């Protein structure tokens, strides 16, 4: 089983709370789905299903500062107007986290396609020129660019706040998002717990990145003639 430990730093990012509307609040930690997307971008993989089953973990190394910015959001409200013009845009407030530093663990899953995502991450770090990819490397939105991503070095951090699976945890985070609607999003409960980063991640720190199971098809209804009602 291949595994890798990464150090990631991002100057500013926002991980939008799914229920946020007028104020785009942010989670205090990037969801596993967001970290998975960043790793796919790193290795140049456009099909996320290829690495369904990969296992990830993360720990916060910093205490990011929160701020609120006012931004213009494009939307399609009126087909008569161009995108971003008149009622096809509106102002929105967005929370930002500044000075995000993470430890990210990735390992190959038992049912993952080969070469596994962890193998591809290791290859990308060893030979960046061998990777074919496009665009900037972001953690979430395209404007939330990664400043540094590299292999873990001794002395990077001794302790951190590890994201652990906990059915009673206070963080409900997406593990597999539905980009068309929310119906197909898979969620899990987590909490942040202080941990020693010199040790191996605890079992509860690992999250398998899988889509939700496909519901079984309902049995077909029996088709027959409806009996005519009899007069009393």
Image: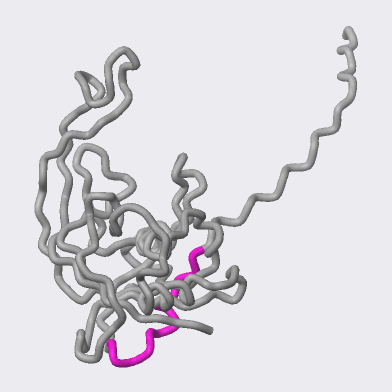
Residue drawn 10% across the image and 45% down it = 69
Give the x, y percent position of residue 128: 35, 71
Answer with left or right where residue 219 lies relative to residue 82. right
The mark total stands at 0
Say whether residue 136 is left or right of residue 217: left
Residue that extends furthest to the top in the rendered view of this protein: 231
Residue 62 vertical position relative to residue 157 in the rendered view, above or below? above
Q: Residue at x 32, y 77 (%)?
A: 6
**Residue sitting farthest toward the front:** 129
Task: Name the image quarter holding residue 91.
Answer: top left
State whether the magenta stretch is mostly helix, strand or loop: loop
Q: Nearer the viewer, residue 142 or 89?
A: 142
| Magenta span includes 153 | no
Point 39% across, 72% down: residue: 124
Name the quadrant containing residue 19: top left
Placement of 141 over or under 152, stated as above or below? above
Residue 16 in percent (x, y) is at 27, 50
Q: Quadrant of residue 200?
A: bottom left
Residue 62 showing in the rendered view: yes
61 left or right, relative to 182: left
Magenta span: 197-209
Q: Is there any visible trace of residue 164 in the rendered image?
A: no
Provide residue 18's location: percent of width, then percent of height. 33, 47
Q: Nearer the viewer, residue 87 or 8?
A: 8
Quadrant showing the C terminus: top right
């Amino acid at each position: 089983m291949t595994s890798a430990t990464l150090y990631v730093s991002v100057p500013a990012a926002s991980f939008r709370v799914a229920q946020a509307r007028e104020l785009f609040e942010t989670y205090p930690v990037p969801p596993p789905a967001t970290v998975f997307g960043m790793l796919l971008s790193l290795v140049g993989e456009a099909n996320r299903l290829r690495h369904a089953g990969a296992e990830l973990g993360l720990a916060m190394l910093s205490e990011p500062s929160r701020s609120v910015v006012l931004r213009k959001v494009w939307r399609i409200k009126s087909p008569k107007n161009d995108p971003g013009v008149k009622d096809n845009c509106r102002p929105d407030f967005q929370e930002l986290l500044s000075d995000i530093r993470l430890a990210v663990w990735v390992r190959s899953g038992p049912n993952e396609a080969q070469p596994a995502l962890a193998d591809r991450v290791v290859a990308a770090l060893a030979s960046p020129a061998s990777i074919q990819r496009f665009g900037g490397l972001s953690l979430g939105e395209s404007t939330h660019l990664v400043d540094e991503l590299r292999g873990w070095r001794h002395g990077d951090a001794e302790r951190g706040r590890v994201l652990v699976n906990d059915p009673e945890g206070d963080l409900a985070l997406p593990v597999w998002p539905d980009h068309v609607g929310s119906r197909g999003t898979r969620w899990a409960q987590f909490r942040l717990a202080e941990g020693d980063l010199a040790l191996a991640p605890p079992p509860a720190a690992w999250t398998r990145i899988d889509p939700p199971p496909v519901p079984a098809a309902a049995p077909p209804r029996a088709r027959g003639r409806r009996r005519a009602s009899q007069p009393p």
